[in-house]
């Protein structure tokens, strides 16, 4: 008994030693940590230090300045608007790419990934050329006193161009895990139930399978429900042939 326990303990120790990272993995982790520190942590720390260099009172005064306040409102407002548009168009695009097979699907998928390959400078120049004052779209909207480039619509377009691929690629695996039968049941529920039930059904189908709430009726097997509802069926424990 003692020899067996010693052998099991030695196996566990060898398994633990095998799971420890090697020198190469430690070096890669160190490089990744240094990359994050140089590009994220150090600039943020420098920004905080310089912001409060003259004291909290000066910082509050600068933040509440009219120019700073307008910049914050513009940033937060465009961020909320772009987030709502990404939820709408990003989810719809991911749904089409996940659920349907059609000619040109590969081209649409590549078009979604295009902003990830195009530099942001090129994207800005492209938006200025397509929607500038000298373009067809720009002159059309200029006749209605609507400016696109160098205005809020241009900022929204640029943010949509950059962020839409991340939303599509993040939603696709979630939609792929949803069963088609659950989608059909959800559609029937949306057509015939109240607004509260429609909202609950939509939220439930939007989450991954592991995060969805389960009920005994939903988790029960269909054949078990049909068998239990049949008066002529008897369980194996009470069946005369199984006794």
Image: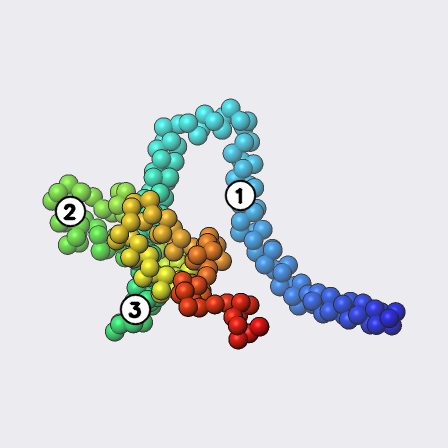
As drawn, which residue projects farthest toward the bottom? 241
Q: Is residue 63 above or below residue 37?
A: above
Q: Give the number of the mark in front: 3 or 2.
A: 3
- Give neighbour class at mark 2: few <14, some 14-19, many 20+ (Cα, 10 Å): some
Q: Earlier in the sequence, mark 1 or mark 2?
A: 1
As drawn, which residue projects farthest toward the front? 240
Q: Is residue 150 above or below residue 1?
A: above
The answer to whether residue 19 is left or right of residue 99 is right
- Give neighbour class at mark 1: few <14, some 14-19, many 20+ (Cα, 10 Å): few
Residue at 21% x, 52% y is 131
Q: Is residue 199 above or below residue 99?
A: above
Of helix, strand and loop, which one carries label 1?
Answer: helix
Residue 100, numbered label: 3
Q: Earlier in the sequence, mark 3 or mark 2?
A: 3
Residue 141, numbered label: 2
Q: Of 172 and 154, which appears nearest the observer?
A: 172
Q: CA distance from mark 1 to mark 2?
A: 40 Å
Discs 1, 2 touching: Cβ within 8 Å: no
Residue at 44% x, 30% y is 63
Percent of width and height locating residue 206: 39, 55
Discs 3, 2 touching: Cβ within 8 Å: no
Q: Please say whether residue 223 is visible from this viewpoint.
A: no
Q: Residue under label 1, please give it.
A: 44
Image quadrant where one finds the C terminus: bottom right
Q: Please say whether residue 60 is visible from this viewpoint.
A: yes
Q: Is residue 158 above or below residue 181?
A: above
Q: Earlier in the sequence, mark 3 or mark 1?
A: 1
Percent of width and height locating residue 1: 86, 71
Of helix, strand and loop, which one carries label 3?
Answer: loop
- Give neighbour class at mark 3: few <14, some 14-19, many 20+ (Cα, 10 Å): few
Q: Give the number of the mark in front: 3 or 1.
A: 3
């Amino acid at each position: 008994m003692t020899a067996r326990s010693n052998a099991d303990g030695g196996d566990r120790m060898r398994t633990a030693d095998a799971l420890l990272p090697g020198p190469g993995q430690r070096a890669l982790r160190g490089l990744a940590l240094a990359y994050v520190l140089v590009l994220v942590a150090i600039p943020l720390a420098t920004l905080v230090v310089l912001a409060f260099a003259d004291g909290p009172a000066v910082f509050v005064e600068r933040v509440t300045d009219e120019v700073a306040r307008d910049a914050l409102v513009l940033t937060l407002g465009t961020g909320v608007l772009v987030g709502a548009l990404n939820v709408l168009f990003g989810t719809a695009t991911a749904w089409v790419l996940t659920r349907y097979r059609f000619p040109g699907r590969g081209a649409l998928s590549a078009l979604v990934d295009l902003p990830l390959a195009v530099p942001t400078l090129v994207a800005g120049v492209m938006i200025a050329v397509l929607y500038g004052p000298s373009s067809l779209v720009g002159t059309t909207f200029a006749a209605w006193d609507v400016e696109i480039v160098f205005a809020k619509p241009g900022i929204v377009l640029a943010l949509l161009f950059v962020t839409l691929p991340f939303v599509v690629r993040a939603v696709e695996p979630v939609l792929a895990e949803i069963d088609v039968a659950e989608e059909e049941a959800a559609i029937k529920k949306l057509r015939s139930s109240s607004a509260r039930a429609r909202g609950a059904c939509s939220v439930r189908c939007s989450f991954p399978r592991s995060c969805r709430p389960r009920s005994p009726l939903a988790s029960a097997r269909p054949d078990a429900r049909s068998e239990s509802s049949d008066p002529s069926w008897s369980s194996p424990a009470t069946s005369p042939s199984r006794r």
